[in-house]
Image: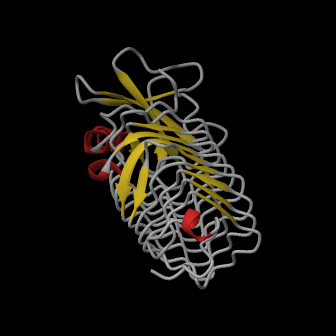
C-alpha cells in the first residue's frame, strides 16, 4: 500500500492504534529490535496500522513496508502525533477527514474523491490540481479553504454549502455542470481562466475576479457581487437573477439569452442587462 494512501479507516481508530507506539519512546530515543533508522534522515517516522487487528507498528522505511491489510501513516518526529504536511499526490479517496486540521499542508494533485471533508480546516494549504468528486452537503459543507491555492482544481458532482473560500486562488479550475457550491463565501477569489458550469447560487462574490471568463449556463443567482470584476465576461444562457451587479465592473460584458438580476431576459433589452442590474 502506498505511503500516502489513506483509507476510510484513517479516522479515530488510527489515533488509538498509534498511541500504542508511545511505549517505544524511552528517554526521547526511538528504539526497536532491529535498531532501525527511526526517524529517517528527513525526520519522518513511518508506521503501519492494521485495521483488522487494531494494532500499530513502526517500520524502517524504505527497507520495510506496510503489509496487506495495513494503512501507512507518517508523522514528524519533531512534533509527535502530527502527520506530515507534504502530502503531494496523496490519495484520500473514500477517507473520513471530517474536522481534520490540514492547514498549510502541501496537497498538490491530491485525490479527494468521495472523501468526507465536513468542517475540515484547509486554510493556507497548497492544493493545485486537487480533485474533488462525489461530495454532498453531509460530507463537504462547512470546510474552510480560505487563502488556499486551488489552481487547476476540479469539482465534479460536488454539492455543498457554507464553504469558506475567502481569498482562495481558483484560477484555471473547473466546476462542472453537475456541481453546486452554494451559500458560500468567495470574497476576493480569483477565478481567471476557470470553467464554471455549475450552480453558484446565494454566494458572496465581493471583490471576486471573473475577468475574461465565459459563463455558459452558469447559475449565479441570489448572491452578492459588490466590487467583483466581470471585465470581458461572456454570459451565455446564464442566470443572474437576484444578484446585485450594480456595484460590479462590467466593462466589455456580453449578454446572450441571459436572465438579468431583475428577472428579465437580456434578449428583451437588445441583448444587454444594462439598466437591469438590480434585483
Q: In this view, does 9 lie above or below 265?
A: above
Q: How many labels does the image show?
A: 0
Q: Is residue 149 above or below residue 249?
A: above
**Spot occupied by residue 180 in the image (x, y as percentages of width and height):** 41, 52
User: Nearest the camera: 10 or 63?
Assistant: 10
User: Nearest the camera: 213 or 8?
Assistant: 213
- Could you tell me which residue is drawn at 67 percent across and 68 percent down? 209
Q: Which colour scheme is used?
A: secondary structure
**Spot occupied by residue 92 in the image (x, y as percentages of width and height):** 45, 36
User: Nearest the camera: 268 or 117?
Assistant: 268
Q: In this view, does 176 lie above or below 180?
A: above
Residue 53 picture quarter: top left
- Could you tell me which residue is drawn at 26 percent across and 50 percent down? 138
Residue 210 picture quarter: bottom right
The quarter of the rendered structure image containing the C terminus is bottom left
Of all residues shown, which one is farthest toward the top?
A: 68
**Spot occupied by residue 269 in the image (x, y as percentages of width and height):** 59, 71
Residue 199 picture quarter: bottom left
Amino acid at each position: 500500500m502506498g505511503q500516502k494512501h489513506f483509507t476510510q479507516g484513517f479516522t479515530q481508530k488510527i489515533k488509538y492504534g498509534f498511541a500504542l507506539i508511545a511505549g517505544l519512546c524511552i528517554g526521547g530515543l526511538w528504539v526497536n529490535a532491529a535498531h532501525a533508522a527511526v526517524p529517517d534522515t528527513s525526520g519522518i517516522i513511518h508506521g503501519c496500522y492494521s485495521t483488522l487487528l487494531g494494532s500499530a507498528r513502526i517500520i524502517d522505511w524504505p527497507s520495510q513496508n506496510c503489509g496487506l491489510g495495513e494503512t501507512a501513516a507518517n508523522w514528524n518526529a519533531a512534533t509527535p502525533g502530527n502527520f506530515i504536511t507534504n502530502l503531494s499526490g496523496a490519495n484520500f479517496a473514500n477517507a473520513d477527514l471530517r474536522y481534520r486540521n490540514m492547514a498549510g499542508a502541501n496537497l498538490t494533485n491530491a485525490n479527494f474523491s468521495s472523501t468526507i471533508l465536513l468542517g475540515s480546516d484547509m486554510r493556507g494549504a497548497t492544493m493545485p490540481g486537487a480533485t474533488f468528486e462525489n461530495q454532498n452537503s453531509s460530507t463537504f459543507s462547512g470546510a474552510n479553504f480560505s487563502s488556499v491555492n486551488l489552481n487547476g482544481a476540479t469539482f465534479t458532482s460536488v454539492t455543498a454549502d457554507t464553504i469558506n473560500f475567502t481569498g482562495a486562488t481558483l484560477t484555471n479550475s473547473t466546476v462542472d455542470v453537475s456541481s453546486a457550491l452554494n451559500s458560500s463565501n468567495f470574497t476576493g477569489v480569483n477565478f481567471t481562466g476557470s470553467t464554471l458550469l455549475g450552480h453558484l447560487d446565494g454566494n458572496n462574490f465581493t471583490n471576486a475576479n471573473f475577468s475574461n471568463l465565459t459563463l455558459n449556463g452558469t447559475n449565479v443567482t441570489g448572491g452578492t457581487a459588490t466590487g467583483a470584476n466581470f471585465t470581458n465576461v461572456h454570459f451565455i444562457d446564464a442566470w443572474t437573477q437576484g444578484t446585485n451587479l450594480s456595484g460590479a465592473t462590467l466593462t466589455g460584458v456580453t449578454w446572450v439569452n441571459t436572465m438579468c438580476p431583475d428577472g428579465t431576459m437580456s434578449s428583451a433589452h437588445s441583448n444587454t442587462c444594462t439598466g437591469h442590474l438590480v434585483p
